[in-house]
Image: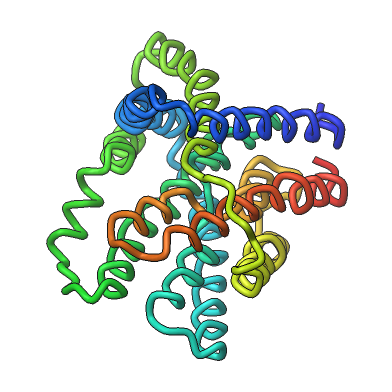
Amino acid sequence: MNPTLEDYLRTAILTLVLLGAGIALQRVKAAKPVFRVINLVVIWVMLPAIVFSSIAYQSLTRILGAAVPLAFLGLGVCFILSMAVARAMRLDKKASTAIVLNASFMNVTYLGLPIVYALGGDLGPASLYAMAIGITHLTFGVAMATSAAGKKVSLRSIVLGVLTFPAAFTLIVALLFVGFRALPPTDMKIALDYLAKPSFFLMLLFVGYKIPPINPRKYLSSLATVGIIRSLICPIVTYLCIMALPGIEIGGPTAKAALIMAAMPPAVFNMVIANKFKLNLKLYGALVFYLTLVSLFLALPLMVFLLGF
């Protein structure tokens, strides 16, 4: 049975509670080392476990499905459109980078996977979609931020960054199991699946901890630009692609996962990039925080209501 709109709203409220708890814990000094550990556990243990469990037990036919093409089609349109808009607005390199990164790369990992899971979606297509976006984000995000900061872009450092990202490496291993049709032990999947619920709980808590509330008035034009692309254009493009591509049912697991992911707000990883390269962290924080609220309480419930999943 598909979740109703009321089911989704309960999920959204629970998500907001976890985000709010994370925001409240920003004021607790002792929480900083705790969240540092949480982030390490999620990145190095829980997220790789979810990716492996979701991918390694799938068939090759399903792996070669439409999740990855849908991810790249949505990403491509948003990337080109945000580049054009930033140029039309005559923004400098740093401001343009903020618009492009936040309009193109959505929060597929820390928010997308928990929402798909909560709505009874299939984590197989969702994980493939998330990894397609995540690896591209890791590559282009670092390259664009490096350039915006006035530093030389190194192909070697970017490639090493992707290959040493735990979830990306785990995806490669999982795909090898699929390619050689070597099904891992069933007991392993049961153990890995036990990590799903606590990992999603910790992911949402961590998102809240990383996005401090910021007065939005200073960034209204950026919020409007990124918000329209993220919450409206990307879901519409994804829906049209689903209708155009053969063999995808609008209520099927791939379509459901792709549409939910397409409506996700800007990725928290954009803030990590902004902090690392000394970009405008307040602008990035405002885009992530306020558009997360728009996604949870406007874009996603409207989609659930209109599409009936």
Colouring style: rainbow
Q: Quadrant of the N terminus?
A: top right
Question: Viewed as shown, does residue 306 lie left or right of 143?
Answer: right
Question: Viewed as shown, does residue 276 lie left or right of 300?
Answer: left
x and y percentages locating residue 135 in the rendered image: 35, 53
* Residue at the image point whose x is 47% and y is 41% from the top: 210
x and y percentages locating residue 133 in the rendered image: 45, 54
Q: Nearer the viewer, residue 3 or 178?
A: 3
Q: Nearer the viewer, residue 130 or 13?
A: 13
Question: Viewed as shown, does residue 308 lie left or right of 280?
Answer: right
Quadrant of residue 166 within the rendered picture:
top left
* Residue at the image point whose x is 50% and y is 49% from the top: 129
On the question of residue 248 being in view, the answer is yes
x and y percentages locating residue 32 in the rendered image: 37, 29
x and y percentages locating residue 48 in the rendered image: 35, 31
On the question of residue 245 being in view, the answer is no
Quadrant of residue 275 within the rendered picture:
bottom left
Q: Quadrant of the C terminus?
A: top right
* Residue at the image point whose x is 51% and y is 38% from the top: 207
As drawn, 267 above or below 226: above
Toward the top, the furthest residue is: 187
As drawn, 302 above or below 136: above
Toward the left, the furthest residue is: 156
Q: Nearer the viewer, residue 210 or 252?
A: 210
As drawn, 244 above or below 181: below
Question: Viewed as shown, does residue 257 lie left or right of 72?
Answer: right
* Residue at the image point whose x is 48% and y is 85% from the top: 91
Numbered marks: total: 0
